[in-house]
Amino acid sequence: MSALRFEIQATCPETGARAGLLQTAHGVIETPLFMPVGTQGTVKGLTQRDLERDLDARIILANTYHLFLRPGHERIQRLGGLHKFMAWPRAILTDSGGFQVFSLSDLRKVSEEGVLFRSHLDGDLHFFTPESVVDIQLALGSDIMMALDECLTYPVTHEVAAASVNRTIRWARAGYEHYLRREKGPDCALFPIVQGSMFPDLRASCADALLELNAPGYAIGGLSVGEPREMSQEIAAVTAPFLPADRPRYVMGVGMPEELPQYVAQGIDMMDCVLPTRNARNGYLFTSSGKVVIKQAQYLEDESPLDAECSCYTCRTYSKAYLRHLFQAGEILFSMLATIHNVKYFLDSMRRIRESILAGQFPRLLKSVRSELFAVHER
């Protein structure tokens, strides 16, 4: 039995948006939730103290592929598991590494048994199977693990996508059977991933087959792979109704701040994306009054905070002028301060969404976001 438990506290009757509680072995997480991405056991630019005490992140994402290559899952296990290794007391989700492996293109070869690939670090050959990916994540000690899947770039033909879906289903079954056989504590859960590219019929058939596993949660993968952003939302909206209503639904690799409530409106409970951290390092900041590109000359002598409505350390303490100076000077401190703000902005956005669902006000929030988007497109 998995330690994972999911309780739905409120559902928006107009949209199907849900607010709930996700119980893990490392704490309770309020949903809908956004996971900061800590690919290599660290969220770039943040300390674990920042994440826990100041930002109150309840769960972060780490990457199986990168941790497998360096420092290695067996070493992490000998050192007490990923939670102890990175001094993170709260929940961790690890993705399967499938997305990273398939992004290697010329450096990998797919077979029915798994994926043979060369490390991007040193060129060494490695082989991921549905079973080995489970073993790696069990060694890491993840709270939520992802099954190995095949992630295709966009566009592909229906024929190619159908063959990929069948392989993903076979891998999910093999991985899940291995997961059930393994000696393990109750502290982890394995989510299969629904694939099917941008074809609704393939998404439906993949979801239908994966439901046979009776998994504690399901993910929607294969988005943000080159398709228009509107198409990502359409496919998520098509897929979500096929997934069990009493289990958490996770859309992988999305999205922009204005997209968060739109995914939630489709019944999605979990999301992750590198946008807040990557954009922060590049000087692109999200605020309540719109984006701020900090290198612009208009901020040269701007004494105002980055976002007057934000309570993060960066906004409480520093001016736009100082942040611009740090960015222009290439100071590491800029990346740290900018990341604190951007991650806070995403987490707070999701908290406001959750509060609106519990208060029965989510349709109003969603309408305001869509109105703002329409105004932007009109301009």
Image (cartoon, rainbow, N blue to C red):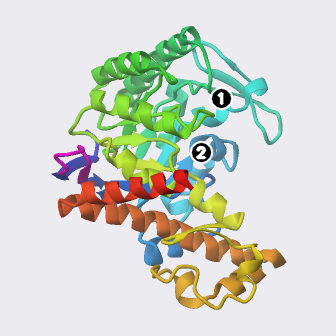
Q: Are marks 1 and 2 in contact (CB under 8 Å)?
A: no
Alpha carbon separation for disc pair 1 and 2? 20 Å
Residue at the disc numbered 2: 73
The magenta stretch spans residue 220: no
Q: What element carries label 1?
A: helix
Residue at (63%, 88%) from the top-left corner?
319
Q: Which residue lies furthest to the front in this view?
A: 378
Looking at the image, can residue 148 be seen? yes
Residue 272 percent across, percent down from the top left: 49, 50
Amino acid residing under circle 1: Phe
Q: Which of marks 1 and 2 is in front?
A: 1
Question: Residue 203 has which mark?
Answer: none
Pinpoint residue 151: horizontal percent, then vertical percent.
57, 27
Is there any visible trace of residue 47 in the rendered image? no
Place of residue 136 in the rendered image (x, y in percent of width and height, measured from the top left)? 54, 38
Quadrant (top left, top right, bottom left, bottom right) of the C terminus? bottom right
Q: Residues within 10 Å of mark 1 (few under 14, many from 20)?
A: many
Identify whether 326 is placed above or below 276.
below
Q: Splitting the image into 4 quarters, where does residue 215 fall?
A: top left
Q: Residue at x 51, y 15 (%)?
A: 167
Q: Where is mark 1, residue-wise?
A: 102
Is 378 placed above or below 252 here?
Answer: below
Q: In which quarter of the image is residue 91?
A: bottom left
Q: Nearer the viewer, residue 6 or 112?
A: 6
- Residue at 22%, 61% (x, y): give it: 361
Q: Residue furthest top?
A: 159
Looking at the rendered structure, the kind of residue marked 2 is His
The reply to whether the magenta stretch includes residue 15 is yes
The image shows residue 177, relative to residue 17, as above or below, that is above
Mark sitting earlier along the chain (1/2): 2
x and y, in percent, of residue 84 in the image: 50, 62
**What range of the chain is rendered magenta?**
11-20
